[in-house]
Image (spheres, rainbow, N blue to C red):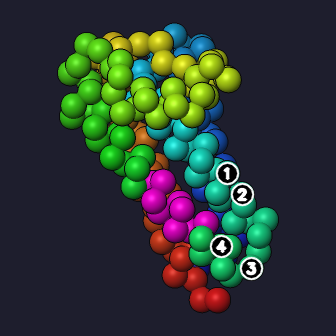
Amino acid sequence: MPRASALLLTAAVVSLGAVGAALVSQHVFDMQPCPWCVLQRVVFVAIAIVALLGLVLRAAFPRQVAAIAILLLSAGGVAAALWQHFVAASSTSCKLTLADRIVGGLGLDSLWPEVFAAYASCADAAVKLAGVSYEFYSLVLFVAMAAVGFVVLRRPR
C-alpha cells in the first residue's frame, strides 16, 4: 500500500495537472469555460493546497484533517461536475448560479482572470473530448481524489 506522503503528493500533482489541462484547452484550443468549469478548477486547486499542507505537516492529526478536507472537496467537485452535466449544460445562461456566486465571491475571477474567469455559457461550454463530456473527466478525477482522501484517512497512525 502506498505511503500517505506519496498519495498526498499524487493528489496535488493530479489536481494541478487537471487545472493545467483545462488551461491548455482554454488558451490553446479556445474552449472557454463556464462558471461550473471554473468552480471545478477552484476545487482542484483547493485539493492541491490541502494535499500539500498534509504532506508538509507530517503529524497524524494534520494529515487526517487534510484527508477529510480532500474528501469533502472531492464530494463538492463531484456535485459540481454532475450539476454541470445534467442541469447547467442545457442552460443558455450560467449567470447568478451557485458556481458564479462562489467564484465571484472568492474574487478569484478578478484576481486571476486567465485561470478563474468564466467566458462561456454552460451550453456553449458543453464540449466533448474523445466522445466524453469534459465534466466526466473531472468527475473521475474527483472520485480518485476522494479515494486518496479515504486511504490517507484510514492509514494507521
Q: Secondary structure at mark 3?
A: loop
x, y (%) of residue 61? 66, 79
Classify 145 as above or below 68: above
Splitting the image into 4 quarters, where does residue 82 fall? Answer: top left
Q: Is residue 149 left or right of residue 92?
A: right
Locate residue 34 relative to residue 94 in the image: left or right: right
Give the overall secondary structure of the magenta segment: helix
Q: CA distance from mark 3 to mark 4?
A: 6 Å
Which residue type does callout 1 highlight?
Ile
- The image position of residue 32, as x and y in percent, is 47, 15
Indicate whether 39 appears above or below 53. Answer: above
What is the three-letter code of the residue carrying label 4?
Arg
Residue at the spot 65% in from the left edge and 63% down from the top edge: 8
Identify the residue position indicated by label 3 in the image: 59
Q: Quadrant of residue 139?
A: top left
Between the C-alphas of marks 3 and 2, the distance is 13 Å
Disc on the earlier residue, 3 or 2? 2
70 in the magenta segment: yes
Determine contact: label 1, label 2, CB under 8 Å: yes
The secondary structure type at the circle numbered 1 is helix
Which of the two discs, 4 and 1, labels the residue nearer the N terminus? Answer: 1
Residue annotated with mark 2: 52
| Residue 63: numbered disc | 4
In the rendered image, the quadrant that contains the C terminus is bottom right
User: What span is colored magenta in the figure?
Assistant: 66-74
Q: Name the residue located 42 percent from the left edge and 26 percent from the top edge.
A: 100
| SS for callout 4 | helix
Residue 74 lies, with reference to residue 115, above or below; the image says below
Marks 4 and 2 sit apart, C-alpha to C-alpha, by 10 Å
Residue that badge 1 annotates: 49
